[in-house]
Image: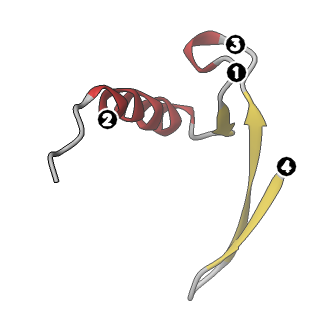
Amino acid sequence: MVIYLDDESRRYQCTAITSRFGSLRGHRIIRGREQECLEYYEELKVQRQLPLAAE
């Protein structure tokens, strides 16, 4: 999937894929930003393990 982005100074695009290899296998990632995607999924895993705050 190609994602087109605009900000105030430029336009650019990135490609989202489902990784087939390594520790990101089966996860959606942005090509060329694998390290950031890995950090995101690791943080997500930690957040899911935290207990919910009491209301």
* Badge 4 vs badge 3, beta-carbon distance below 8 Å: no
Q: Nearer the viewer, mark 3 or mark 1?
A: 1
Q: Which residue is located at x 69 percent, y 13 percent? A: 21
Q: Amino acid at mark 2?
A: Gln
| Mark 2, residue position | 47
Q: Position of residue 19 (x, y in %)?
A: 72, 24
Q: Position of residue 49 (x, y in %)?
A: 30, 25
- Side of 31 relative to 35 (left or right): right
Q: Amino acid at mark 3?
A: Phe
Distance Cα–Cα, label 4 vs label 3: 18 Å
Q: Nearer the viewer, mark 2 or mark 1?
A: 2
Give the image quarter of residue 3. Answer: bottom right
Q: Nearer the viewer, mark 1 or mark 4?
A: 1
Position of the C terminus, as image quadrant, is: bottom left
User: Of helix, strand and loop, which one carries label 4?
Assistant: loop
View extreme (front): residue: 55
Crowding around mark 2 (Cα neighbors within 10 Å: few <14, some 14 to 19, many 20+) is few
| Disc marking residue 1 | 4
Distance Cα–Cα, label 3 vs label 2: 24 Å
User: Of helix, strand and loop, which one carries label 3?
Assistant: loop
Sooner in the amino-acid sequence: mark 2 or mark 4 = 4
Q: Amino acid at mark 1?
A: Gly
Distance Cα–Cα, label 2 vs label 1: 20 Å
Q: Is residue 47 above or below residue 22?
A: below
Looking at the picture, tell me which residue is in the foreground, 47 or 38: 47
Q: Which residue is located at x 59 percent, y 21 percent? A: 24
| Disc marking residue 21 | 3
* Badge 1 vs badge 4, beta-carbon distance below 8 Å: no
Distance Cα–Cα, label 3 vs label 1: 8 Å
Q: Position of residue 34 (x, y in %)?
A: 56, 33
| Disc marking residue 26 | 1
Sooner in the amino-acid sequence: mark 4 or mark 3 = 4
